[in-house]
């Protein structure tokens, strides 16, 4: 798959593409990332890509015409097959693991990284097919959301992570949050005093460990993301044993 990134700051992407375990996807070409510096498509001597907004107000707005030229160049290089044009914005739909999986199985996308006060709305209306948001907060530009999407897609490519790692991911098959993890030492000195690894994890009893991990996943999800519990229940992903655990957790003393 191929991702074409239109950005004012292509240098922000290079470190990410060469570091960490996800570099396997980029090195192998499984996820082909092409960077398109937006200022290359400005036509004036100052390589200007922004201007004051009509109607007044603070800040600057990214001009539509340089972005149109950049998109035309990307399409000319990619060929005629259509791909999503993604704009990152607080007004976009949430970026979810389900959407990431869809994109990981697709042809890729064109990623528009906005800056300043935003992009001329006419460019969005005429060219953008998908607007995405990382959450209810504001960033300085679209580069960080683009990097987040690239990382999430790259780690789903074959050979990047093991199947077991994917099974233990948060938002894996059942859409619930992952529970806690522990490692050495068995007893850790902390500012709150000694803290031990839960005994069940040291028992060697695999069935009990799996039950404990499931309970922790359900507990954490019920506490922090009850919407995910509701979605899993609606989709039929919760077993009778899960519902029994949730009923016990619903007691005030347990949550």
Image (cartoon, rainbow, N blue to C red):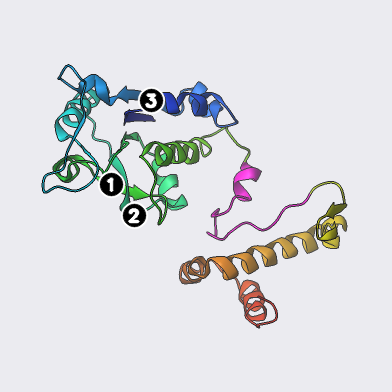
Q: Residues within 10 Å of mark 3 (few under 14, many from 20)?
A: some
> Gap between marks 1 and 3, in whole Å?
21 Å
Q: Is residue 152 above or below residue 21?
A: below
Q: Which residue is mark 2?
A: 93
Q: Which residue is more in the foreground, 148 or 216?
A: 148
Quarter-of-image position of residue 144: top left
Sequence-wise, the earlier of marks 1 and 3 is 3
Q: Nearer the viewer, mark 2 or mark 3?
A: 3
220 shown above or below 5: below
Which quarter of the figure is the C terminus placed in?
bottom right
Q: Is residue 153 magenta?
A: no
Q: Residue at x 73, y 65 (%)?
A: 211
Other residues around mark 1 within 10 Å, as few (<14) / some (14–19) / many (≥20): some
Q: CA distance from mark 1 to mark 2?
A: 8 Å
Q: Which residue is mark 1?
A: 130
Q: Secondary structure at mark 1?
A: strand
Name the quadrant containing residue 31: top left
State if disc 3 and disc 2 touch (CB < 8 Å).
no
Residue interval drawn in magenta = 163-182
What residue appears at the point 37 percent right and 27 percent down from the top-left corner?
A: 9
Give yes or no for contact between labels 1 and 2 (Cβ–Cβ under 8 Å).
Answer: yes
Label 3 belongs to which residue?
Answer: 10
Q: Which mark, by number, is residue 168? A: none
Residue drawn at x 34%, y 54% as measured from the top left: 93
Quarter where residue 11 is shown:
top left
The disc, 2 or 3, on the residue closer to the chain's N-terminal end is 3
Which quarter of the rendered picture does the N terminus lie within?
Answer: top left
- Gap in angstroms between the C-alphas marked 2 and 3: 25 Å
């Amino acid at each position: 798959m191929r991702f074409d990134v239109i950005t004012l700051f292509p240098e922000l992407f290079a470190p990410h593409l060469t570091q960490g375990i996800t570099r396997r996807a980029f090195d192998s070409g499984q996820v082909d990332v092409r960077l398109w510096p937006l200022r290359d498509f400005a036509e004036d001597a100052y390589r200007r890509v922004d201007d004051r907004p009509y109607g007044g107000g603070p800040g600057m707005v990214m001009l539509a015409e340089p972005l149109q030229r950049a998109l035309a160049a990307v399409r000319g290089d990619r060929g005629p097959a259509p791909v999503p044009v993604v704009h990152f914005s607080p007004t976009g739909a949430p970026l979810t693991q389900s959407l990431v999986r869809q994109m990981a199985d697709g042809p890729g996308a064109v990623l528009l990284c906005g800056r300043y006060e935003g992009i001329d709305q006419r460019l969005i209306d005429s060219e953008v097919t998908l607007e995405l948001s990382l959450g209810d907060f504001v960033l300085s530009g679209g580069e960080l959301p683009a990097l987040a999407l690239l990382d999430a897609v790259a780690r789903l490519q074959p050979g990047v992570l093991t199947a077991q790692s994917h099974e233990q991911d948060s938002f894996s098959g059942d859409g619930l949050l992952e529970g806690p993890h522990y490692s050495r030492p068995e007893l850790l000195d902390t500012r709150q005093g000694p803290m031990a690894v839960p005994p069940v994890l040291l028992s060697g009893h695999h069935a009990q460990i799996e039950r404990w991990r499931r309970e922790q996943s359900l507990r954490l999800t019920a506490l922090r993301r009850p919407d995910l519990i509701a979605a899993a229940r609606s989709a039929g992903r919760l077993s009778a044993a899960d519902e029994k655990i949730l009923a016990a957790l619903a007691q005030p003393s347990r949550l």
